[in-house]
Image (cartoon, rainbow, N blue to C red):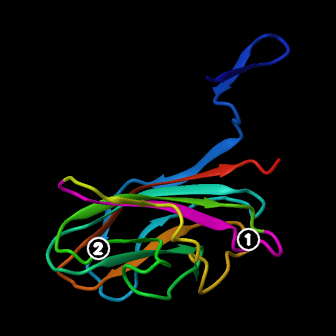
Amino acid sequence: MGWTFYNSSGQRLSSAAPGSAITREGGNTTEATTTSTSQADILATASLTVQATEPFYYIFNARKTAGAASAVVLQLKVNTTSLNTVGGPGGTTDLWGTSSTNQAESGVVAIFTGSRVTNYQSAMTAARGVYPSAAGIGTIDFSNVTEMVRSAVIPIAEITALTVIGSTDSASNTIGVDEAHVYSYAAS
């Protein structure tokens, strides 16, 4: 169900879903890949204008190729601050991670972040899904990313860039990140 807004003259102004105070801040729909075995920037979504008082939502696709029996891990950088550089592939503090099985895997990450204000700089959670690319049973995990904000807190500042960072246990596996989208919510 949607809403249609009119001015006092009856002229249609816009149509929107309920709670229409949502703004698409930007995105990056060009796949970026790496085979780095040390943490590296993979995909940046830049030119954003998410104010500190605005909650936001960030979603992207991720994948790992077959090539070696090793895991890959993704983390997040907000502006220039890496939120979690602790731990290795497959840990519960990963933003997204795969199994160490030699198989292609893909999935999605959806990050929900509250307003970044004094005493609330860790207001971030995520849902992630990881599936074998061929078919079969995967995992959807809503609870094990609660330690995403571990190396640093989210800055109380305008967010101008979100960058997916990550590494693989073996350079024989490629990590891919694509279809990133950022939406902010009105603060009032």
Tell me if residue 174 comes above or below residue 132 in the rendering. Answer: below
Residue on which the image places disc 1: 157
Residue 96's tag is none
The mark that comes first in sequence, 1 or 2, is: 2
Q: CA distance from mark 1 to mark 2?
A: 35 Å
Q: Which corner quadrant of the image does residue 14 belong to?
A: top right
Q: Label 1 crowding class (10 Å Cα cut-off): few <14, some 14-19, many 20+?
A: some
Tell me if residue 126 comes above or below residue 7 in the rendering. Answer: below
Q: Amino acid at mark 2?
A: Ser
State the residue at coordinates (37%, 82%).
89
Q: Amino acid at mark 1?
A: Ala
Residue 160 location, x and y as percent?
62, 66
Q: Over which residues does the magenta segment extend?
A: 117-134
The answer to whether the residues at label 1 and label 2 have Cβ atoms under 8 Å apart is no
Q: Helix, strand or loop at disc 2? A: loop
| Image quadrant containing the N terminus | top right
State the residue at coordinates (73%, 60%).
51
State the residue at coordinates (50%, 88%).
86
Residue 112 location, x and y as percent?
61, 59
Q: Is residue 132 magenta?
A: yes
Tell me if residue 124 comes above or below residue 27 in the rendering. Answer: below
Residue 99's tag is 2
Q: Is residue 57 left or right of residue 175?
A: right
Tell me if residue 141 comes above or below residue 10 in the rendering. Answer: below
